[in-house]
Image: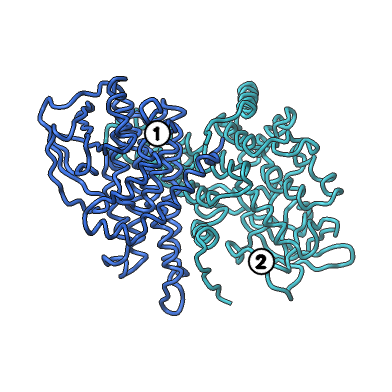
Amino acid sequence: MDLTFSARETAFREELRAWLSDNRPAQEPAEGGEDAHYAWRRDWQRRLYDAGWAAPAWPVEYGGRGASLTESAIYFEELGRARVPLPANVLGLLLGGPTLMVWGSEAQKERYLAPILSAEEIWCQGFSEPDAGSDLASLKTRAVKDGAEWVVTGQKVWTSGAQYAKWCMLVARTDGDVPKHKGLTYFLMDMEQDAVQIRPLRQITGEAEFNELFIEQARIPEENVVGGEGNGWRVALTTLMNERAGLGFALQVRLRQLLDDTIAVARERGLLENALYADALAELHIRCESIRLLAWKGLTDVERYGQPGPEGSLVKWLWSDTNQRLTQLAAEIVGPAALTAGTSWSYELLRARGNTIEGGTTEVLKNIVAERVLGLPRLKAVP
Amino acid sequence: MDFGLSDDQREIQRTARELLAERARPERVREHAEAGRLDDGLWRELCELGWPGIAIAERYGGQGLGRVELSILCEELGRSLAPVALLPSVLASGAIELAGSEEQCARLLPALASGETIGALGTAGDGVAELVVGAPAAGLLVLVEDGAARVLTRAQIEIEPCESIDPTRPAGRVSAPAGAGEALRGDVAGGIDRALVAISSELVGVCDRALAMTVAYVKERKQFGVPVGSYQAVSHRCAQMLLDTEKARATTAFASWAADADPERLGEAAAMAKAASSEAGVDVTASAIQAHGGIGFTWEADVHWLYKRALVDSALLGGARTQRVRLAALLA
């Protein structure tokens, strides 16, 4: 057991920390809405890219630094710590690129990877559908072969960044006659065609991070199939497995900062001497530290022993629940500002409700833990 | 960063688990618990293996290994509920090693390290400590009162046995006259922190066993034609038990490591570990009783021993709220 970082890892952290302190993102635009905000994050990614910091986990041959899992986690911890935004093309960098590295042809890697890294081409993810959320494999969007092209019709939902995206990681049904996991194919769909209509999905915070996609006979050339026809489920799993690997560390640091900010307000208002507040804040402190320890344990066990423990699902479950508790407690401590629309406190409070739903609902995570970690009998699905 | 055990540590864990699975079978634990006595034969075996002195320095007759190794043993003892007074004894020896003078350590520790003398540690008010685990068997007592600690021999104190709800480890009410015994003038708080880590480790073992028993039971037990573990009301409870156990395990691992490698962070780490493991201990074992249904409430089923051990361990040296109050002071 050694809960310290190696000299190499520490050097990596220090180099990045120094770079981040010398290279701040431009002032966050106060006006111009989401478009201006997105442009600002895109600009930030270009600066990261120019310095070789857009995707350190990517292999050197594709423009990354070949960073280890630990270094990649350090990268996200440091972005969180420096309170800078994530790169605009986060889905391309974390999901699309790594999926292509596993399943893509040489021609696909050649064509797509570089523009992901430089934020020239933004990626979005077309997996969920109105009737296929947790039960993703029951998705209904269809692709039918027409000569050298596929013709796609259907509807996708929860597509973040769709309005800025050039490419969509799309999973569609290409064979309706085989069991549901088997008839899927993974495509790269060009978003710049009239057959794809985007409608923003306004969420409880009032903003629209996500969109609905209405796809009516969109055309995808056959060379844009990833991993082969009928292999979409396996390719999609690769994408999903990458979903939380690094991002979790940025979220966990964000949680820590929010707790520290909350404690600072509590201190200012003399609430730390109140046993009830002190108890609740100490409990959140323990939860934050547990999340940090469990996340690092999960990651380093994979790195050192090649064996993931049960931590992955547990960390996401514990983090989402903790963020909700924290933001609700913060509302009590901060008072009216947390209940006033447009403040960061009220934003965090409302946004946290999504945490136990996005990226695997807590209920599904509990099923995963029960079935795959504890080996409990599977609940019989309704046929 | 590496949360894994070294090869030597794994070997200690494997040996302990195998030995206790053989020598502290549930029926033997039950037999001793119902008779309200410790298992002297098992204690002698553990002493021959050097367990009581595993974390005591070699110059005081111990094995000179670390707190991580001690935590491994405590976890296995918690898992098996072995009726021995190893935990109380290491609480006392840990406090003496940290807070005692060189002379005191040299004089008091060898008998604790060999297991010839059993130690116990209690927190007193006006010279009286209630429900001191291991006291009836103890030849030497560390009493902590208002942050000051003193060591007392059997002859200097009065011990009245009291019936602990956890009969796998008898407890007693200890009273000591003012001024009796010898003061420990060193790092008493550091000794208490190490004690918290050892108790937390035992609780992790208790949780792990309760979860394993529960998972095995709900896979077997059928109602309405299916194993009850296929109902989400039951399986999600089991998932919660795992989450609580893993939280306790992670914070306890960090505290065990800090005790050896980063003592400056031990105070905070020990408070976190004891808070998480105290809460997990009670919640997980209570869930185990619930998931066992009616049988879980009977004396016949073994889950109640785990619940009782968890209740007593959780309270030892302060439960979750006590630890959180302490953490809150650190945050302030």
In the figure, residue A34 lies in which quadrant?
top right
| Side of A218 relative to A358 (left or right) | right
Residue B291, compared with residue B120, is above or below; it is below
The CA distance from mark 1 to mark 2 is 58 Å
The label shown at residue B328 is none
Tell me: residue A51, above or below residue B8: above
Please give the letter of the chain rendered in blue: B
Taking depth in this image into account, of A96 and B63 the one nearest to the observer is: B63
Q: Is residue A32 left or right of residue B212?
A: right
- The correct choice, above or below, for B106 with respect to B243 in the image is above
The answer for which chain carries disc 2 is: A
Tell me the quarter of the image containing the C terminus of chain A. bottom right
Total numbered badges shown on the rendered structure: 2
At mark 1, the secondary structure is: loop
Using the rendered image, report if marks 1 and 2 lie on a common chain: no
Could you classify mark 2 by the number of other residues whose Cα lies within 10 Å: few (under 14), some (14-19), or many (20 or more)?
Answer: many
- Residue type, numbered disc 2: Leu
Closer to the eye: label 1 or 2: 1
Residue at screen point 38% across, 32% down: B62
Q: Residue lying farthest right?
A: A147
Q: Residue furthest bottom?
A: B225
Kind of residue at disc 1: Ala
In the picture provided, is B50 more to the left or to the right than B180? right
Q: Could you tell me which chain the residue with mark 1 belongs to?
A: B
Residue that badge 2 annotates: A139
Residue A295: where, in percent of width, then height? Answer: 53, 43
Image location (x, y in percent) of residue A215: 73, 61
Chain identifier matching the cyan colour in the rendered picture = A
- Per the image, the residue denoted by label 1 is B55
